[in-house]
Image: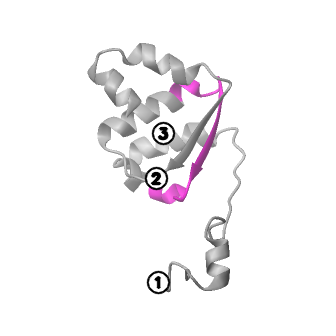
Amino acid sequence: EDLRKAYTENRLDKRLRIYIRPKLLIIDEIGYLPFDSLAANLFFQVVSARYERGSILLTSNKSFGEWGELMGDPILATAILDRLLHHSHIVNIRGNSYRLREKMRTGAYGSPSTT
């Protein structure tokens, strides 16, 4: 939303520098909400600008195969993943939510497939 606002105010180049500058950019919860075409394009610009210049730590509950749908454009998703996955270290965490673990143990919350 920050980049969208900068785009509409004609100051995108200046705002992109904020996201390019840090040694590590942390992006949490990619895929929580789908991207429209502008958001996907802006995300590509950030990833592309940081490619081989700065690290990105990214979390998502979506598999790489779902990114085409998430971005609304499989070709753009492939370009983003190509840059993100080159030189990457992937940590795939499987299992139940850490935050819901105690609730599940007491029976207050069942696994998503049973509720």
Start and end of the magenta stretch?
Answer: 48-66
Which residue is labeled 3 in the image?
Answer: 79
Q: Disc 3 vs disc 2: which is toward the camera?
A: 2
36 or 113, nearer to the observer? 113
Q: Is label 2 in a helix, a strand or a loop?
A: loop
Secondary structure type for disc 3 = helix
Indicate whether residue 55 is drawn in magenta: yes
Disc 2 residue type? Gly
Q: SS for tag 1? A: loop
Could you tell me how far apart the alpha carbons at marks 1 and 3 are, in whole angstroms?
37 Å
Q: Is residue 72 above or below residue 65?
A: above
- Relative to 57, 113 lies left or right: left
Can you identify the residue that label 1 sits on?
Answer: 115
The amino acid marked with disc number 3 is: Ala
Q: Which mark is residue 31?
A: 2
Q: Quadrant of residue 92?
A: bottom right
Image quarter where the N terminus lies is top left
Q: Is residue 1 above or below residue 49?
A: below
Q: Position of residue 52 (x, y in %)?
A: 65, 26
Counting residues from the start of the chain, the first of labels 3 and 2 encountered is 2
Q: Residue at x 71, y 54 (%)?
A: 91
For discs 1 and 3, the disc positioned in front in the rendered view? 1
Q: Residues within 10 Å of mark 1 (few under 14, many from 20)?
A: few
Q: Say which label, 1 or 3, has the lower sequence index.
A: 3
Q: Is residue 7 left or right of residue 45?
A: left
- Looking at the picture, which amino acid does disc 1 mark? Thr
Check the image and report above or below for 59 versus 103. above
Residue 27 position in % (x across, y down): 56, 40
Spatial CA distance of label 3 from label 2 is 16 Å
Image disc number at residue 84: none
Q: Where does the image place residue 30, in percent across and percent down from the top left?
A: 50, 48
